[in-house]
Structures are given as C-alpha cells and as structure tokens.
Amino acid sequence: MDLLIFQAPILMVQASLDGILLGILFALIAYGMALQWGVMNIINIAQGDLVILGGYIAYTMYLMGIHPAWGVIVSPIIMYFVGWALYKLVINKVVDRDLFISILATFGIAIVFQQLMNFVFGADVVVAQSEYGTTMLFDNSVTLPNSKIFAAFISVLYAIGLVIYMKKSRLGRAIRATAQNARAAKILGVDTEKVYAATFGINAALCGVAGALISITLTLHPYVGLPYTVRSFMIVIVAGLGNLPAVAISGMGLGLFEEFADYILGTEFRIGAVFMLLVFILVYRRFKLSKKREYLK
Amino acid sequence: MKQKDLILYSGLIILGLVAPFLFSAFKVQLTYLCVLIVLAMTWNLQGGEMGYNSFGNILFYGLGMYLTASVQVGMFFPLAEWTESGGEKTFVHTTAQYFQGIGVGLLVAAIVPTIVAGAIGYAILGLRGHYFAICTLGLGIAAGEIAGGIEIIGAGQGFTTPPFPAEIVDPEARGQFFYFLSFLVLVLAFIFVKYIYGSRFRLILNAIRDNEDKAEAMGIQTMKYKIVGWMCSAFFCGLAGGIMGGLIGYIDSTDVAFDGREMGVFMVLMAILGGKGTLWGPIIGATLFHFFKEGLWTFILGWQYVALGVLIVVIVVYFPEGLMGWLREKYPERFGEVIDEKDRKAQVELK
C-alpha cells in the first residue's frame, strides 16, 4: 500500500491523538442527545444545528474583539434559552407523539436554523482564532494545537459538572425521575412540562459549549450540522442511554475512526465514511438483536 | 360508480395529454409535477401503507439519474473522457443514439435500483421505527458524499448529461418529449398503485404497519413483503430520477442527484400533506405542494428554505393526518364508512 499513513507511522500517533481529542468533543454533544432522548423520547435532528449555532455565538464574540474562549461560558447561557424557546414553540407538541413525527419536525427546525444562519453569518467557512499556539511532540513530527487540548479539557469539565448537577440538585433529581417514569413523577408532584423544557434547554446549552469549542478547533459552516447529529446519534446507540463512561469511550472511538478514515480513504470521503458507519452500526445492531430474538423462541 | 370512475380517469388522461399544448410555457413545470406525483405516490406505498418511513428513497432516485446518464453516454462514447471534458462537447449524440441511449438507460435505471433495494432490504428493513428512518437518512447522504468522490461520474464538478439532439429543430420537441415520458411513467405508476390498492398485498402491508409482530404471528412472512414493497418504490424512484437527469441536463452529486435536502424531503412532505395511506392523498398533496412552491418560491426568494422548514413543522405538528385524513374525519360517509348516528351524537355531547 502506498498510503502516506503506512509510510510514515508517526502519522498514526498524530491521527490517534487528534481522534481522541475530537472524540471527547463528540461525546459531549452525544451526552446532551442521550439526556434528551432518555427523558423526552425525542430524536433531535436539529442537534447538530444547535451546535453550529453555539459556535456562531462564539464566532460573533470573536468578531467583536472578545476572546472566543469566553464563548464556552456565554454560548451555553444563550443556547439554554434558545432550547427552552424551541421547546415551548414546537417540541412540546411532539413529545408524546410518534417518533417519526418528532424526527420530521426537528428536521424542519434544522432546515430553518441552517437557512437563518446562512443569512446572518454568510455561507463562508469561518474559524475563530484562539491564538493558543501548538504543542510539538516527538521531535516536531506530531503537531497538536493547544486549542484542541483546551477543548477536550473544557468538555470533560462540563460533563463532570453536569453529572454532579444531575446527581445532587433538585432539578437533576426531577429530570431523572421523569426519565424513569413520567406519569409516576407527575403524580408525585413533579412539573414534567417544566422538566422537559429544562432538559431541552440543558441539551441546547451543552450544544452551545460544544459549538464554541468547535469554533476554535475546527471550522464552522451553516450546513455542517447534520454530520454532528449523526455522530452523536451513533455514539448514543452504541453506548446506550445514560451510560457516561461508555459515551466517552465510543466518542473517542468515533474520533479515531474518522481520523484514520481521513488518512486512508481521503478527505473527500470523510463525511461519507461517517454516514456509512452509521448504516453499518445500525445493521450490525439489527442482526445482533434478531439473534437474541431467535434465542427467545 | 363505475361509470363515474371511467369519466374521471379518461378526463384526467385527456387533461394530461393536452396540458403541454394548452400551457406550453409550463412544460418543464408539468414534467416536474408528474415526477413529484410519482415520487410521492411510491413513497406512500412503503411510508404510508407499510409504515416504514424512509428518508432514503432519494438513494434510488439519484442512482437512477446517474445510471441513465452513464448508460446513455457509455453506450457510444468512453465515459471517462466525457466527464473529463465537462461542459465542452467533444462527442455529439446523433438522434438515434440519443433515443436508444435514454431508452436503455431508463431500463437500467429502473432495474438496478430495484435490485439494490432487494439486496440491502434484508439488512435495512429489519430495523424498526426511527432506527429505520435515521438509517435511510444516513444511506441517502452517504450515497451523495460517495458519488461526489468518484472520478468517472464527474466527482464534485458534476456530470453533464447528453444534450437533446440538435437535428430536431423544433424548439418544443425537447419539453414535449420529457413531459410525455414523465406522464407515461405517472400513468404506469398510478395503474400499478391502484392495482396494489385492490390487492391482498396492500392488506399485508397495512398489517405490517399496524402491528408487525402480530402480522408475523398470523403467518405472514413480513420480511418478504417488506422487501417487495421497498422494491416497488425503488423501481419508480429510479425511473423518475432518470427522467429528471435528462431534463435538468446536469447532475451534481449532492444538489441534484442525492438531493436529500430538497427531493428527499419533498416526497415525504407531499405524501403527508395529502394524507398517508390513501390513493389520492399523495397526488393531491404533490399537486398542492408544487403549486404552492412555484407560486411562492419567487416571491420569497432567498427565504424559500426557511418557508420549507416552517411548512414541514406546521404540517407535521398540526396536520399529521394530511388533507385526506382531515376530510375523512369530516365526511366519513364519503369514504364508505358507516357511522352510527347515536355514536356521533354521543361524541358531540362529550365534547
């Protein structure tokens, strides 16, 4: 094979480090999706577009002369209210309905978001410069942007913070109760409507953090939301709902897969590889489950 | 009743036949309409009747488009050189070559997607509910991304389909040819779907939609019927794609062929707008949608996708049963449903 990655094995180290750092970021988005899927039983196709919107908030700060890293604090606050408003406008009407309806409705929301972002921020690929510099490893043969390390660190911080919040706080307990059994929670005095709105808001806020981190590590474009949705969907179905370590591990696995696919298949097939992986995972899962069904017979 | 049907159908066919002469300025739009109706009707076959809501029928549409154009070129000229030369026409099809090419191309475009649907059907159709929807969504997008990386069909720069033969000087000929081609496919699709609606096959599909496990327990080999249902959709999607490729004259991997953002959503939306699981619903839905789209698109230039997104949300959230479902609720007698008068009064009192 005359692929570059096999001629220069050091590139494997590069790809692995890139993939793991990127994967932590994916895991953060997937955690939001798992939360919202587990509690409300809704698959949010607009997840990726919320991420991109969060990224554009950080980018706007960058344009205004504020360091984009502050976006990891400002963006989730704004995005919480965006998510909350979205819930009040549309999502609350599809919560108890057929899953396909929620998929299609959030697909519509995704299209609206993409287009509005296209109007406001233009169709160019943009990036917010963090000017954190790069770290060189192994005799300068592996370059690691510090912004990626920063992104992974912040992601882990937020994930831990959220886990503690869900365990300790009153709202966290209410959310967990609703996820277990919405009706029982309602009978015991939990305002499920409020819990749903808060859950969707928290999900959007997590997307905001991830978006702000993406704005300094990767690039932003109005139409790249869907791959993020698919990535987080994949991570969630591999890891299961509410299993945080598994989410982190499968996120890193996905990051590794993507980086290696990038080197081996070529950059033009990167997104295609992600979507094909989705199809393969679903089909694999289907055969595994059907085998289980056969045992039950 | 029979005679009424006869009058209706013959009236529609005559309307279809004279339409391109009556509205000769709108031939391209009418062709679009025919293709949209075919797509909505065949999507409904497995989305509405079988309950397997696919976002991925665009896969077969795009496949048909690429296949028709590739066969049409590849039959007479080297394909790689054609795509390399891009827009510059180094090869010219004669009239006979053009029609032979498109004929064989459409045949291939119908058969290959059907085979593909059959081949992947066993794996994909085992997925239930939303997993199926997301999987097919991924499939459609992956196909677009992969087609955009393959050199021989033009990769990212697109594929120019053979131009209509220059020997035919009549300027109306091209539009009429594609219109009648699409109208023929529409009529075929309608006859086929109508036939299915009167058959046992439809009952089986409905049983799968209503409760798949029970259907299986009743002794129906659900997997077999699901695959056949999907293959029926794929057949017509491939044909529609082939026609659209020739009409548009240029194939781009993600914007024209595997256009999940437009066609892929349109076919779902049209079927839902008209009413899933009815014969006339998708037809009415597609017609309404097309008129709405063409009427408003130009007025809200730039905002059309925002309008599309809002339209999806509104239709899905407020009219999930569609127009036919709404009519059925309002005038159940017209649909052959017998309603007990006492029951209805009780319903009104309850409200």
Image (cartoon, rainbow, N blue to C red):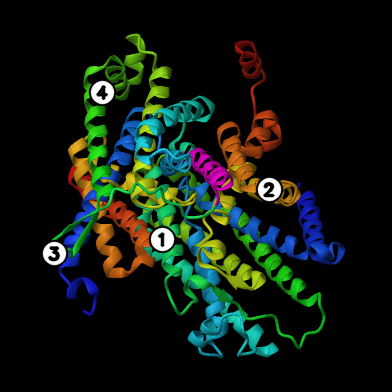
Q: Please rate how many residues cluster around mark 1, counting C-alpha atoms within 10 Å: few if below 14, some from 14 to 19, many from 20.
A: many
Q: Is residue B18 visible?
A: no
Disc 4 designates what residue?
Answer: A166
Looking at the picture, do discs 2 and 4 lie on one chain? no
> Left or right: where does residue A101 sit relative to residue A285?
right
Q: Main secondary structure of the magenta part?
A: helix
Disc 2 designates what residue?
Answer: B289
The amino acid marked with disc number 1 is Ala
For the point 32% across and 15% down, which residue is it? Answer: A184
Q: Please rate how many residues cluster around mark 2, counting C-alpha atoms within 10 Å: few if below 14, some from 14 to 19, many from 20.
A: many
**In this view, the mark in front (2 or 4):** 4
Disc 3 designates what residue?
Answer: A139
Distance from the alpha carbon under mark 3 to that under mark 4 = 44 Å
What secondary structure is found at the residue carrying circle 4? helix
Q: Is residue B74 above or below residue B270?
A: below
The chain ID associated with circle 1 is B
Distance from the alpha carbon under mark 3 to that under mark 2 = 62 Å
Q: Position of residue B267 (x, y in %)?
A: 58, 52
